[in-house]
Amino acid sequence: MDVLMTCKLFQEMTMEEINSILNCFSAKEKEFKKGEFICNQGDVMAELCVVLEGSVHIIKSDYWGNQTIMTEVRPGEIFGESYACAEMESQVAAMALEKTRILKLNLLHMMTVCTSACPCHNRMIKNLIMVMARKNVNLTEKIEHMSKRTTRNKLLSYLSAQAKKTGKSSFTIPFNRQQLADYLSVERSAMSAELSKLKDEGILDYDKNYFILTGISAK
Amino acid sequence: MDVLMTCKLFQEMTMEEINSILNCFSAKEKEFKKGEFICNQGDVMAELCVVLEGSVHIIKSDYWGNQTIMTEVRPGEIFGESYACAEMESQVAAMALEKTRILKLNLLHMMTVCTSACPCHNRMIKNLIMVMARKNVNLTEKIEHMSKRTTRNKLLSYLSAQAKKTGKSSFTIPFNRQQLADYLSVERSAMSAELSKLKDEGILDYDKNYFILTGISAK
DNA sequence: AAATTGATGTTGTTTTTCCAACAAAAAAGG
DNA sequence: CCTTTTTTGTTGGAAAAACAACATCAATTT
């Protein structure tokens, strides 16, 4: 599968190595119809899921049954690894948005078996650790932005982080307005208004996804 | 060290096993004075740090130099593992709050060396994966609560999650009011007011840290 | 070229939060 | 037991966000 080559879990592996890994983790492919549930809230998940084709919504329902879509998972991306590795019941459900093919890798014997038979077992574990660590850093960063009280400060937190990352005061962001608003959990229109204000005040400038941080922010 | 026995990284290990692990990861103990920086934003971290004694603040400074304290790390807890495992520059600094002793474990050769010499290498990796996975689940949960637009909905999101977790409609939370407000990133007083309102409306009842979810929430 | 669609910006109203100050209750300390 | 400190609840005014509705602009389709 070409998709697997793009998956972070299998980075720096050849086709043959990936195949031996799939074997070693008793990988099983499953197909789901549109609307079908791949796993439910409360399931005990010993498996990591790779999306091969289609797309999946990760859904959380609360005590009263209200549902929230948390993320969308697309081909080459994975889900369920946190619950599998933490040996916890899944706190979320996963639903196929369309006809979707999933590859399930059983992590139960991840650490115990396979010292020599499969050459890339270690590489796979390292990749998994890296994927989780990256996700961790990203989640922490998102929380950092979201924890700011006002839309203005959320924006400045996010934009200044981008500036710091790129090392430049001008940069392009990977979101459009609606996506940025969703990421920061604010109203799109209010955010747009706040961006205008920041531009007026000379703190920043922008055109579409291209931003320039200029002025000095008091706090 | 007694502290190490309480550290999640070394769970299910004996003293001797921990010692061999420390050797294998070329652990080095370092002492820091109050106010001293253990690592700086931008440092390349190949090391995971365990706090043996004292306490550490994880600090983030933005583009303009404004600083935020993100977490406090106490004895037996670890930090820096995400950046070490993700092979990224640290996005945060760590400062000793008082006289603090730190144990640094080098993760660089985590996957490559030590197949037989050290019996618990695998267990250590498994523990590390579990720690990161748990952290991941917790961060995701926190984001879920924080993403709600109003203080009321943040509260309901958090409380309903606790109810779901315990499987009961009554439960005790591990936060006092100020801590809960910090966790949800809202004003304590406004949150208190909102709790009163929810009680008046018959949606829940509480006494100190003890909560009961009763009524039906519209959304 | 006209019509449609999607993304973005603007504005006024309503709702909610923030903030500050204070009150009340509970816990801790002497 | 009394004092001090901490925690929690309450209130009113100022600030900000949410919301809804609409305007503008660009890209796409017909």
Image: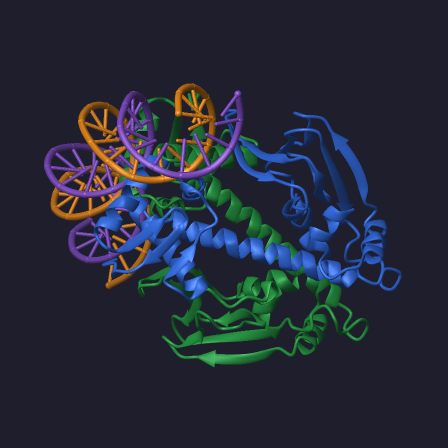
Chain colours: A blue, B green, C orange, D purple
The reply to whether residue B12 is in sight is no
Q: Residue B120 or A141: which is nearer the viewer?
A: A141
**Who is closer to the viewer here, D19 or B68?**
D19
Q: Position of residue A139 (x, y in %)?
A: 50, 51
Left or right of A73 in this view: A217? left
Q: How many labels does the image show?
A: 0
Residue sitting at x 64%, y 55%: B130
In the image, residue A151 sits, relative to residue B63, either above or below, namely above
Give the residue at x 41% y 44%: A184
Residue A121 position (above or below residue B95): above
Residue B194, placed above or below residue B74: above
Residue A100, image x and y in percent?
A: 71, 33
The vertical placement of A110 against B55, above or below, is: above
Q: Is B101 left or right of B24, judged from the image as shown? A: left
From the image, which quarter does the C terminus of chain B lie in?
top left
Q: Is residue B17 left or right of residue D16?
A: right
Specify whether B122 is left or right of A186: right
Q: Which residue is drawn at 52% across and 57% down?
A: A137
Identify the image quadrant of residue A187: top left
Query: Which quarter of the rendering shows the N terminus of chain B?
Result: bottom right
In percent of width and height, residue A90 lies at: 63, 39
Residue A26 at x, y percent in the picture: 83, 46
Q: Which residue is drawn at 64% across and 60% down?
A: B128
Residue B213, visible in the rendered structure: yes
Image quadrant where residue B195 sits: top left
